[in-house]
């Protein structure tokens, strides 16, 4: 084993043996090179005042070389903030700003030990890092039956882990914490579980309330107390879009420093929170019992980044940092939040009108971008195709009965018409079936 990897592993074993045991084979092997090109370039950047002939970029007039046709569209930014490589861990000022934002929006983090966010190429990349470091053949990844399909690609196809599902909702239509607990405790023989918590949920738009949040934390704690090492991942892609009767914090805070056998990992980003989907700026943050442990995990994470994408895009990191530091940032976010909440409320009002009760129910939703219909009389995929071909309406079919509708991209004034068209599509298929 490479000596730097061995040293990181020894640190993890000394600080928390359980966290070391959570690592995949790749997670144990990975390290961030300290004596290679990057470290030598960093040293030269600080000391080579005459000529710095280390890093693979081109300079002109002591600033990064660039094309005028590109710079003309980005003239508000200095070339050094958009053309140079960003560090593998991300732009330092952005990491600091995001950590400050996390604490402001999650008061439960006060007094907890957690690291500095590392920049990822949005959330999928962050989840991929989690899979690389902690998932391997035979490991169980516990997610609800209503989930984002990319989890299977990320954890199962890429890393060979096994998906374990539990029903998202219980009979009362609230979060099924008992099902989560049962799924975790079923991993007793394996001694390890990876739990992914995605709130607001994709595809249903559901976020637990405070009571349910405590039940989720209790379920994960029960697993740890039963001797199971739990990698607890909060996929906070839609964080902040909480419209009614739900948690308004990530469970990352409540899980931090809870038990030595629980490793909380927060994966979030500007993607949905700041409405910059194409920027691909995300973050991964660890909580742990010591700074040494956090440093070791961050070094391994940087090794994954260095060995895959090398570093994230610098321009979009600069753009996000500029937004976070802008005096208008909070007011503009509140304005967009109000629009999103209006669309969610209008969706619920239309669905609660009683007009559609014969053909569908809907799963509880209170947050995020989406909601899900539960069709009673027609097949979801058949309806999806019919809506596309006959009405020019796009939806997502999930299984036989579930149809996901993204109210996030529909003007509030158009929402009733949208559901009327979906309803008409159902009636068309029912009529065809009778014939």
Image: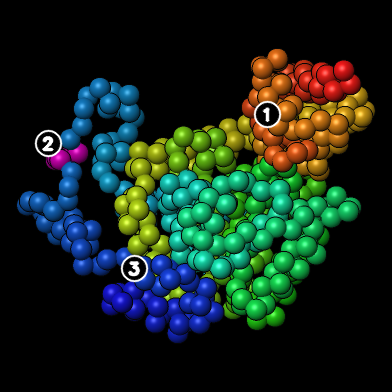
* Earlier residue among tags 1 and 3: 3
Looking at the picture, does residue 416 appear above or below residue 166? Answer: above
Residue beneath disc 3: 31
Seen at 50% across and 66% down, the residue is 136
Looking at the picture, does residue 28 appear above or below residue 146? Answer: below
- Secondary structure category for the residue under label 1: loop
Seen at 86% across and 31% down, the residue is 377
Quick check: 287 left or right of 434? Answer: left
Seen at 88% across and 53% down, the residue is 171
Q: CA distance from mark 1 to mark 3?
A: 43 Å
Labelled pair 3, 2 in contact (Cβ < 8 Å): no
Residue beneath disc 1: 395
Asked which quadrant contains residue 195, the reply is: bottom right
Instruction: Rate crowding at label 2 as few (under 14), some (14 to 19) or many (20 or more) other CA atoms within 10 Å.
Output: few
Residue beneath disc 2: 61
* Earlier residue among tags 3 and 2: 3
The residue lying toward the viewer, choosing from 114 and 296, is 296
Quick check: 148 left or right of 169? Answer: left
The residue lying toward the viewer, choosing from 47 and 148, is 148
> In the rendered structure, does residue 62 fall within the stretch colored magenta?
yes
User: Residue 28: x, y in percent?
Assistant: 41, 73
What residue range appears in magenta? 58-64
Q: Quadrant of the N terminus?
A: bottom left
Instruction: Rate crowding at label 3 as few (under 14), some (14 to 19) or many (20 or more) other CA atoms within 10 Å.
Output: many
- Secondary structure category for the residue under label 3: loop
Asked which quadrant contains residue 307, the reply is: bottom left
Q: CA distance from mark 3 to mark 2?
A: 36 Å
Disc nearest the viewer among 1 and 2: 1
């Amino acid at each position: 084993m490479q000596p730097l990897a061995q040293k990181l592993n020894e640190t993890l074993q000394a600080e928390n043996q359980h966290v070391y045991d959570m690592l995949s084979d790749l997670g144990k092997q990975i390290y961030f090179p300290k004596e290679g090109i990057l470290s030598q370039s960093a040293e030269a950047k600080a000391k080579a005042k005459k000529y710095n002939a280390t890093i693979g970029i081109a300079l002109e007039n002591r600033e990064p070389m660039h094309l005028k046709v590109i710079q003309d569209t980005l003239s508000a930014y200095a070339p050094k903030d958009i053309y140079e490589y960003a560090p593998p861990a991300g732009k330092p000022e952005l990491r600091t700003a995001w950590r400050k934002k996390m604490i402001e929006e999650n008061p439960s983090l006060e007094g907890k030990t957690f690291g500095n966010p590392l920049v990822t190429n949005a959330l999928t990349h962050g989840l991929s890092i989690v899979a690389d470091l902690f998932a391997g053949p035979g490991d169980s990844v516990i997610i609800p039956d209503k989930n984002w399909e990319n989890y299977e690609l990320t954890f199962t196809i890429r890393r060979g882990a096994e998906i374990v599902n539990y029903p998202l909702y219980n009979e009362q239509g609230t979060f099924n914490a008992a099902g989560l607990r049962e799924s975790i405790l079923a991993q007793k023989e394996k001694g390890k579980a990876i739990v992914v918590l995605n709130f607001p949920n994709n595809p249903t738009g559901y976020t637990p309330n405070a009571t349910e949040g405590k039940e989720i934390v209790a379920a994960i704690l029960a697993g740890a107390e039963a001797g199971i090492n739990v990698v607890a991942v909060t996929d906070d892609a839609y964080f902040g879009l909480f419209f009614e009767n739900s948690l308004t914090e990530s469970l990352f805070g409540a899980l931090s420093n809870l038990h030595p056998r629980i490793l909380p990992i927060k994966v979030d980003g500007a993607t949905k929170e700041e409405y910059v989907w194409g920027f691909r700026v995300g973050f991964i943050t660890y909580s742990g019992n010591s700074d040494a442990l956090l440093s070791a995990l961050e070094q391994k994470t940087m090794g994954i980044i260095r060995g895959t994408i090398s570093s994230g895009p610098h321009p979009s990191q600069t753009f996000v940092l500029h937004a976070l530091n802008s005096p208008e940032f909070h007011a503009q976010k509140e304005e967009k939040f109000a629009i999103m909440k209006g669309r969610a409320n209008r969706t619920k009002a239309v669905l609660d009108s009683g007009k559609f009760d014969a053909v569908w129910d809907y799963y509880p939703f209170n947050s995020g971008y989406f909601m899900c219909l539960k069709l009673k009389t027609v097949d979801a995929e058949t309806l999806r195709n019919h809506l596309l071909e006959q009405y020019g309406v796009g939806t997502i079919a999930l299984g036989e009965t579930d149809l996901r509708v993204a109210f996030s991209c529909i003007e509030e004034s158009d929402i009733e018409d949208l559901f009327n068209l979906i309803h008409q599509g159902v009636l068309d298929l029912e009529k065809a079936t009778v014939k």
